[in-house]
Image (cartoon, rainbow, N blue to C red):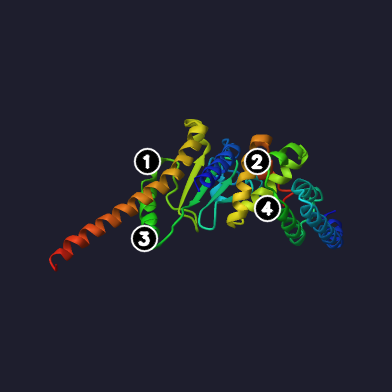
C-alpha cells in the first residue's frame, strides 16, 4: 500500500510543481492588481497535503511567503478569509517564524497574534500535532 | 521596537498555552520508571512537532512538547563581546541554582543560552498560567538585567580609569 503511494507521489511531484508554478504566476498578477488577500487565498488553496516531497513543500512555501509578505491590511484579511484556511495558514506562519529572517518574522508575528484571536488555541495545537499534513 | 518585542512575547505565550497540555505517563520501556519524554525522545508517538519562533537573526525560542513534559530553550540577544560574556556568566549563575527555580534545566540545549524543563508534576503543583507568566516575565527581565550589568561594568571601568590616570595628570 505504501509502495504504490511512493510511486504515485513520484509522478505527482512533477505535476504538483507545475501546478505550483501556474499558481505563482496567477498570484503575481493578483498582487499587481493590489489584491493581496485573494493572492493569499490562492496560495493556500492548492497546498500539497499528502506529498512527502520536500521540493513541492519548498516550492509552495516560496509562493505562500510571497503572498504573506504582500499583506498590509490585517482586518481585511481576516474578514474575507474562510475558517477552513486558518489551520494551513497557522502551519505556514510557524514555518515563517523558524526562518529567522527579520521582515518575515515581523510579518508572521503580526499575523499570528490576530489569527490566534480569531481561531483560538486549537488552531495552534493542530499545527503542533499534525504529522500527516505537514508544510 | 517595543511593539516587536510585545508581538514576540504574545506569540510565545499563546504557543505555550496551547502546548502545555501535560499528563502523567509512565515510561513505556522500563517498568516503574517515569521519565520526561521530551528529553529522551525514544518514541515518536509521544512527541509533538518542535516549534522555533525567531524574533530576528539573533533571538529565538525553541519549544518542544511531549506527552508529559515541555522544554523551552531561549537564545538571548547579544550585541557585542561584552554582552556575550555577561550573558554567559549570568545565565550560568542561574542554571547552577536550578534546584531553587524548579523548572530550570541545569544545562542549556546545544545552541541556546538557557533552557526550561516543565513536567506534569510541575503543572499539578503550580498553576499553568502562572508558569507561563513566569517564563514570559523572565524573558522580559533578562534583557533589562543584561543592560544594567553592562552599564554598571562600563561605569565602574570609567571610574577606575579616571582615578588611575589622575596620578599622571
Task: Kindly check if marks 2 and 4 are in contact, taking CB atoms under 8 A apart as contact.
Answer: no
Residue under disc 3 on the same chain as residue under disc 4: no
Measured as percent of width and height from the top left, residue B109 is found at: 49, 54
Q: Give the chain of mark 1.
A: B
Rounded to the nearest angstrom, the CA distance separating label 2 from label 3 is 38 Å
State which chain disc 3 sits on: B
As drawn, the label of residue B82 is 3
Q: Residue at x 50, y 37 (%)?
A: B132
Separation (CA) of disc 2 from disc 4: 21 Å
Q: Chain ID for label 2?
A: A
Q: Which residue is mark 1?
A: B100
User: Residue B96 at what x, y percent from top left?
Assistant: 36, 49
Q: Nearer the viewer, residue A5 or B146?
A: B146
Q: Earlier in the sequence, mark 3 or mark 1?
A: 3
Verify CB contact (< 8 Å) between mark 3 and mark 1.
no
Q: Is residue A36 visible?
A: yes
Residue located 47% across and 32% down the image: B126
Which disc, if any, is residue A69?
A: 4
Q: Position of residue A34 (x, y in %)?
A: 76, 50
Q: Residue at x 41, y 61 (%)?
A: B80
Amino acid at each position: 500500500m505504501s509502495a504504490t503511494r511512493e510511486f504515485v507521489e513520484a509522478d505527482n511531484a512533477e505535476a504538483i510543481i507545475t501546478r505550483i508554478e501556474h499558481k505563482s504566476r496567477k498570484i503575481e498578477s493578483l498582487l499587481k492588481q493590489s489584491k493581496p488577500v485573494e493572492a493569499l487565498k490562492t496560495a493556500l488553496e492548492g497546498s500539497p497535503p499528502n506529498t512527502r516531497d520536500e521540493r513541492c513543500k519548498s516550492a509552495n512555501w516560496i509562493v505562500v511567503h510571497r503572498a504573506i509578505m504582500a499583506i498590509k491590511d490585517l482586518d481585511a484579511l481576516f474578514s474575507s478569509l474562510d475558517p477552513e484556511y486558518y489551520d494551513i495558514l497557522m502551519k505556514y506562519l510557524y514555518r515563517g517564524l523558524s526562518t529567522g529572517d527579520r521582515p518575515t518574522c515581523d510579518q508572521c508575528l503580526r499575523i499570528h497574534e490576530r489569527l490566534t484571536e480569531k481561531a483560538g488555541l486549537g488552531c495552534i495545537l493542530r499545527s503542533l500535532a499534525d504529522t500527516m499534513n505537514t508544510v | 521596537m517595543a511593539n516587536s518585542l510585545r508581538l514576540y512575547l504574545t506569540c510565545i505565550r499563546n504557543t505555550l498555552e496551547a502546548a502545555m497540555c501535560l499528563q502523567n505517563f509512565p515510561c513505556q520501556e522500563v517498568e516503574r520508571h517515569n521519565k520526561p519524554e521530551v528529553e529522551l525522545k525514544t518514541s515518536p508517538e509521544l512527541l509533538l512537532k518542535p516549534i522555533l519562533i525567531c524574533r530576528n537573526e539573533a533571538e529565538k525560542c525553541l519549544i518542544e512538547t511531549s506527552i508529559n513534559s515541555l522544554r523551552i530553550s531561549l537564545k538571548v540577544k547579544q550585541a557585542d563581546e561584552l554582552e556575550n560574556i555577561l550573558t554567559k556568566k549570568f545565565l550560568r549563575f542561574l542554571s547552577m541554582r536550578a534546584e531553587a527555580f524548579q523548572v530550570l534545566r541545569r544545562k542549556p540545549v546545544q545552541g541556546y543560552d538557557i533552557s526550561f524543563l516543565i513536567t506534569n508534576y510541575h503543572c499539578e503543583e503550580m498553576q499553568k498560567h502562572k508558569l507561563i507568566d513566569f517564563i514570559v516575565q523572565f524573558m522580559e527581565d533578562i534583557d533589562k538585567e543584561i543592560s544594567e550589568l553592562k552599564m554598571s561594568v562600563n561605569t565602574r571601568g570609567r571610574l577606575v580609569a579616571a582615578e588611575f590616570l589622575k596620578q599622571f595628570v
